[in-house]
Structures are given as C-alpha cells and as structure tokens.
Image (cartoon, rainbow, N blue to C red):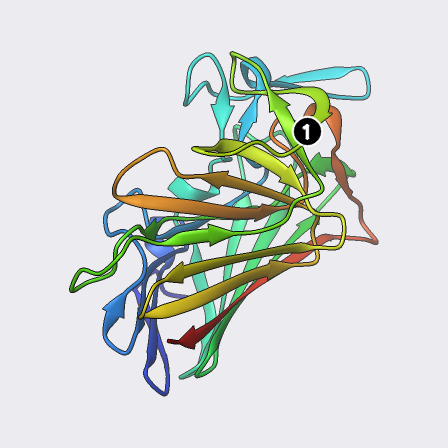
Amino acid sequence: MSTEDVILTAGDAEVTVRPGNGCRIGSLRIDGAELLRQGERYGAFPMVPWCGRIENGRFRDGATVHQMPLNSPPHAIHGFARDAEWRTARSSKTEAVFTYDLTDPWPYPGRVTQIVELTEDALTLRLGIETYGDSFPAQAGWHPWFHRTLDGGGDPVRIDFTPAWQEERGDDHLPTGRRVDPRPGPWDDCFGMPEGVDVTLTWPGRLALNVTSREQWVVVYDEQDAAVCVEPQTGPPNGLNTAPRLVTPIEPLETATTWTWTRL
C-alpha cells in the first residue's frame, strides 16, 4: 500500500488526496479554480479519533482517565490522524480507500478508514472507526479550509445555514453545556442542526457549494481573512467527555459528508 498522492478526476472536477499528510484533501479544483487553502496544515483533513478540543487533553472512559498530548495548550485538538501517515488500500479514477491504524498515544487498538468518491458535481467523504479489542469512545469529522475568495478574485464567500441552536462557548473555547439562540458571526462556534448538517457556501457569480451530512453538529470558523471552515462532525467539541459515540466490536462509528456544487 502506498502513501503517494492520489488524484481523482470526474468531468471538470479534480481532487488530490495526500495519505502521507494525514489523508487530507490537499486540493479540490472545479473548472480549474482551487477551492481549498493550500499548505501542509490546510486542505481538508479528517478529525479522528476526536473533533475540536478536549478539555485539558483528558477524557474519561468508565473509571479510567486518559491524557492526550496538549497540541493546542491547554487542550488537545482535532485528533492526531491528521498528522499521521495513512495508506492507500485501493484507488480508481473516481474513488479511493485509505486506512490508518490507531496507535499510541491513543489507548485503544483500532483502524480508521476513509473513502473518497468524486463525481462531476459532488465529493463524498466517508469515515469509519473500528476496534480491534474493547469498545471505546470516539468522534469523527472533517475540517475543510475553503478559500474566502476564489482564484481570479470576485466577491468573498457567503455562508448560509439555519441552525436550531448554538453551543455557548466559554472563554476556554469549549462549549459550556448551554444551548443558545444562534448569534451573528464572526464564528469559531459549534451549531446544532437536528435534521442534519446543511450549509451552503456561495462565491457570488462563481460557485455554490452545499455541505451536507446526516450528523447534527457543525463547527463554523470564519475569523481569518484567507479561509473559512465548515466542519461536520459526530459530536460537539469536548464531546469525548460530554457526548461520546461508542465504537464497539459489532458496531463501528461511521459517518459521511457530501459536498455538492453548482456553477453560477
């Protein structure tokens, strides 16, 4: 199995996946225009085995407390599969499958699989986490960095969505546990969409891209000039402590997101 970049093409859409760099989507080009911010830390990376921040890097599984490395002190953020080397299990012109085995410092053995599928007007990403032993809590999601302005200029992107609530964010950037009415941006916040994530990014006169997922949580980040983030995920930040999903020997954690685009 290889760690070399994998390029998928369908019509005028092209995707580059970088398994050697956290299995991130390093590039998404539509009609030649790059949608994702470029760089080793950017693109669109899977957040596994947790999403957002874990308070002080610690989470509890029953009576056992586990400590994760503080890669965003005083917290641990976004998992560590984004910094790992994945392997390409198989690939074709329009679909590829990648795997990553969970190892230290994650305390449970398991495997993560990401499937990337491209059509002429959509990109579908799927994540699965399975255990090789005991059940364990986990989360999964994606962290795309979309260009605020597309190549060639034009008006900046507009983000449209109608969440049912916003997770109140404390000074420590973690949800307080209170749900509040959605507030105007700029955001670095988690929102609830109980009917499923449904967010549209529109680059006026160029492209509209609809991010959907059956999950009910999405983090929206638009506090920087270069890019905006729309992050569907299986639970809120600090969710390993407040709303964990359980990976069991008979039931893996599985999630998906689809990005569908329309030319304007």
Residue 54, placed above or below residue 27: above
Residue 73, placed above or below residue 224: above
Q: Position of residue 69 (x, y in %)?
A: 47, 20
Residue 75, placed above or below residue 17: above
Of 239 and 192, nearer the camera is 192
Q: Quadrant of the N terminus?
A: bottom left
212 sits to left or right of 146: right
Q: Image point 54% across, 22% down: which residue?
A: 68
**Label 1 crowding class (10 Å Cα cut-off): few <14, some 14-19, many 20+?**
many
Q: Quadrant of the C terminus?
A: bottom left
Residue 5, image quadrant: bottom left
Q: Position of residue 55 (x, y in %)?
A: 58, 17
10 sits to left or right of 75: left
Residue 163 visible in this rendered orientation of the protein: yes
Q: Which residue is mark 1?
A: 240
**What type is the residue that disc 1 sits on?**
Leu
Q: Image point 49% across, 75% down: which residue?
A: 122
87 sits to left or right of 60: left
Q: Image point 32% across, 83% down: which residue?
A: 12
Q: Image point 43% across, 45% down: which residue?
A: 229
Q: Position of residue 102 (x, y in %)?
A: 56, 42
Of 102 and 21, nearer the camera is 21
Residue 84 visible in this rendered orientation of the protein: no
Of 84 and 148, nearer the camera is 148
Q: Position of residue 215 (x, y in %)?
A: 69, 51
